[in-house]
Image (cartoon, coloured by chain):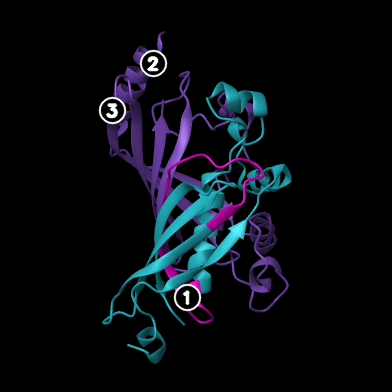
Chain colours: A cyan, B purple
Amino acid sequence: MTGLVREVVVGQAVLPVELTPDAITLLRFGAVTRNAHRIHYDTEFARSEGLDGPVVMAQLHGCLFHRAAAEFAGEGGRVREVAWRNRAPAYVGDRLVVTGTVQSVDVSSGAVTLDLVERCGAGGVVCCRGRAVVIPG
Amino acid sequence: MVGNAVLELAEERALASVGRWERRSLGVVRAEDAAEFARAAGEHAQQLVDPARDDFVVHPMYVVSLLRGAPGADASEFRPDGMYRDEVPGTDGLDVRLMAGGQDVRWVGEVRAGDLIDLRRALTAVERKGVGEGFLLLTVEKVYGSARGTLVEVTERFIVR
């Protein structure tokens, strides 16, 4: 166990990371990942699917979870795992904020498990729950 | 075909394909593409967004977020909803709604610029969830590798309604 890992304690806060994806963000992200699913850019189609409008891609949620984990791991640290479950749709223009706490510390391996949650919009609706395993730097 | 019959057909097809591994190439990872991905994801860390740097690293989420490699797909490979016909097992040609359910991503190695990425995937579970007609929850295991071996393992869930 390194000295830095020793400083990590269960319940410690994960600093928030945030992103407010607009229609341009979703177009760019969809283009670079070759994701043409119409629920991400076609308002009429999204509504026909029972949504309020175009929704944020799952992988973009994943990127925000990864960023929260990577920033917690710090310089020289690494992210071993990231997982998330979609709970509610996040829409264009919603402010997405990932926060969390340290769930456990494995003294033998130095691995730290983070319990993460992503909230969206003005009401702070939970749109994804997740976790990450990091090796702090 | 009414909704329930369509979902039953999707379930039947999916169950028939459980455990069948398939392979697809995602092509060669280009540093410029990975940097563009990082920028689109709102990253500002220079080592993720500037491919000219000596310490540039491919965003760890890049490869697992790619639905296809270059040069993309022909028009015939898409469903009317814009998804790829083969993206969600058992749903090709069926009027069903598709949603992502979440992912577990486990990094085994580091994806580097220049890696030729090979994706293997298999449907591993088909579950009926919810009340009444409900929905299908499909679990797909994915393994991303290169000549250096396995790089990333993913468990992905799709919701079919």
Relative depth, front residue between B71 and A69: A69
Which label's residue is closer to the chain start, 2 or 3?
2
Q: Confirm whether circles 2 and 1 share one chain.
A: no
Image mark for residue A17: none
Assess whether residue A89 is covered by the magenta stretch. yes
Residue drawn 40% across and 33% down? B159
Secondary element at image label 1: helix
The residue carrying mark 1 is: A73
The residue carrying mark 2 is: B6
**Above-or-below relation of B65 to B56:** above
**Above-or-below relation of A72 to B21:** below
In the rendered image, is residue B80 in sight?
no
Is disc 3 surrounded by few (<14), some (14 to 19) or many (20+) residues within 10 Å?
A: some
Residue drawn 51% across and 46% down? A58
In the rendered image, is residue A48 in sight?
yes
Give the CA distance from mark 2 to mark 3.
15 Å
Secondary element at image label 3: helix
Give the CA distance from mark 3 to mark 1.
42 Å
Is disc 1 surrounded by few (<14), some (14 to 19) or many (20+) residues within 10 Å?
A: many
Tag 2 and tag 3, C-beta contact below 8 Å: no
**Above-or-below relation of A51 to B146:** above
The residue carrying mark 3 is: B16
- The boundaries of the magenta stretch are A72-97
Assess whether residue A134 is covered by the magenta stretch. no
In the visual, does A118 lie left or right of B8?
A: right
Q: Amino acid at mark 2?
A: Val
